Structures are given as structure tokens and as C-alpha cells.
Amino acid sequence: MAEGIQWRIRRRRVFSERKDILNMYNDAELVKRYRLDRTGILLVTDFVRDAITPPTGRNRAIPAELKVITTPRYLATGKMQLCNGDDIGMTQQAASKMITQTLDALVTPPAAFISRFVKFPRMQDEIRERKAEFREIANFPEVVGAIDGTHIRIVAPREYEAEYINRKNYHSINVQVVFDARYRILDVVAKWPGSVHDSRMWNECGLKEGFENGTIPRNCHLIGDSGYPSQPWLLTPYLQPRTEIQEAYNRAHKRTRCVVERGIGQLKRRFHVLHGEVRVSPAKTSQIVMVCAALHNLCKERNLDLPDEPDIDQQQLEDRPEEPNHIQPFVPDGVQGGILYRDNFATLHFQPEQ
């Protein structure tokens, strides 16, 4: 009988030794690996501590700080989650679960993390400061933000796959972003498939609604490329300037608009996950973009350095010819009024010197 009994031997669980990251590295080493210093990591943790702290004090429960640390490591490196788990001493499954939980908590409104660090100025003193910063670049007046779109490559999704193929024939999320003159993100929209044109994203975003309904004060302008419709609050370049005034306007416009291209470059340098193919669902990719935007501004607020990599050359951006967008943008009602507004704006502010 004893021979017929098969004893099931329970395998003993082996726990990897978790690393005490906050005490292992100084601030410079933390920024290099996680893009945040100790104070920044603890600040982010405080936003989501209640949401990600285990409800019980069970053995080997993962503390909130370690969950938060795992997320910027993934965003900073773009490495597979197995590698991130190895970095801090846990399994791939545990690292993946922690990243998902932390991302969910950071983008959920009760945490208020995104709205704390990504917000468009509405107070007059903030607006005056943004305008002054932009005017220092090329003497282009009344601008509070520069707008553009950027594509984040993703793995082919299971649903609506064709909608995510952009004009360069790869799958992506099209992200609309607005930067100020100090490369801080004022607004970001990260929910549209890659096939959607920039102008449609603009015409259906909350920021445009703010300009239309007056919650954003008058005499505030964004500056964008020719893919956007010309509107009284969105100044675009002349594709075929015919006068000295229009040429002067275009020169200042191009130099000023370079801010958004450099800003996107800085964002992707800081968070390498945005460089390559993000191998998660479109919804989770959107979360990643939003969290990267907020963390980027937190880094700016704390004066934390970018990775030591070549920056986008300002002169190269300015020397590029103005190229009309080969896809016709959606033209909203009243665009003619925007063109007339631009003509009046250029005449008022870019008269040739006598």
C-alpha cells in the first residue's frame, strides 16, 4: 500500500534578495538609473501610496517605494520587464504587476499626479512669464506654447489594427503635445491611433475648447506647423510668403517653433521607452506617455539632468525648409478668419525696420 502512495513534495519558495535602491545609490546615481533623485521618488510615491500599498502586512509584501522605483526604471530604459526585475531582485511577473499597478494609480484622478505636473497656464502672471520666455527666442510675441504631434511606435494591436498604421506605414499612437519655452509640457493628448491627422486631434481636444469658450484668456497663442488650421489662437506659418512682413514672420515663427521639436527630443531622451516599439496595448501605451510627460516636468521642476547624449541641434532645426503637410488637414468652419487674423498679427508685429 505504501508503495502505491505518491508523496507530493512541496517545493520550497526561494525569494530573491531585494535591493534597497534608495540607500544603495546617491542622488546622481539614482537620476542616471531612474531619472529621479531620492526626493523625487518619494514625492511620486506619496501620490499613489494609498493605492499601491498592500492592504495587509503579509510576509514579503512589496513596499510602495519599490513599486514606484520599478516603473521609472522601465520608462527610462525601455528594457524588458524581466531585466527590470533582475535589477531590483524580483521575478518578471512581479515586476510587470508592479508597473501596471503603479501606472494605473498615477493616471487615476484621485492621485492628481498628472494634473499636478501637466497644466496649461491660466493665471495672468503665469501667462506673462510664458510669453516673455518665448519672446526671448526670436522676438515672436504673445505665444504661451508650441504644439506638435509625435508618433510612439507600438506593437500591432489585436483590435482595430489598421487604424493604428500611420502614414509612414508602422503602428503607432499619435501624441499631441504642447511645450513652453523652457521645455516643460503644458498639455498632452495620448489617445489617438497613428492614422489620425494632427489637425483632427487639435479640433477635438480640450485645450482648443478652452480657447473657444474663454477659459484661457484672450491674447494667448499657440504656435504650430502647417499641419494645423490657422486660427486666432493658433498661429501657423505662411507656406508661400509673398511680402517682407510675411518672410519676417516666418523666420521668427520657425525659430520659436523649434522649441516643441527639441522638447519632444528631450522627452524621448529622458524616457527611452518612447524611442522603440512599446510592446503593450494602446491603452497602456497612452498611460505610459502621460506618466512620462508628468515625470518629465517633475524632473524639470527639480532641475534634474538629462541623460548624457547628443541633443538636437538648434541650427539644424532652423535650417530645415518649411514643408507643407502632404495630407490635407481637416478644415474647420471659420478657418478663413484665422488666416485674416494671422495677416493682421504679422502686420502688427513684424513691420520691417525703417
Image (cartoon, grey):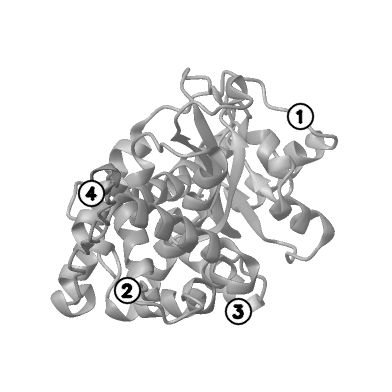
The residue that disc 3 covers is 125
**What amino acid type should be assigned to the residue bearing mark 1?**
Val
Residue at figure coordinates x 67%, y 71% from the top left: 122
Whether the residues at callouts 4 and 1 have beta carbons within 8 Å, the answer is no
Check the image and report above or below for 332 versus 130. above
Find residue 58 and report its horizontal and vertical position in percent.
40, 78
Q: Of helix, strand and loop, which one carries label 2?
A: loop
**What amino acid type should be assigned to the residue bearing mark 2?**
Arg
N-term mark: 1 or 3: 3
How far is the residue under mark 2 from the one under mark 4?
21 Å
- The answer to whether residue 228 is seen in the rendering is no
Q: Of helix, strand and loop, which one carries label 1?
A: loop
The residue that disc 1 covers is 331
Of circles 1 and 2, the one toward us is: 2
**What amino acid type should be assigned to the residue bearing mark 3?**
Asp
N-term mark: 2 or 4: 2
Q: Of helix, strand and loop, which one carries label 3?
A: helix
**What amino acid type should be assigned to the residue bearing mark 4?**
Cys
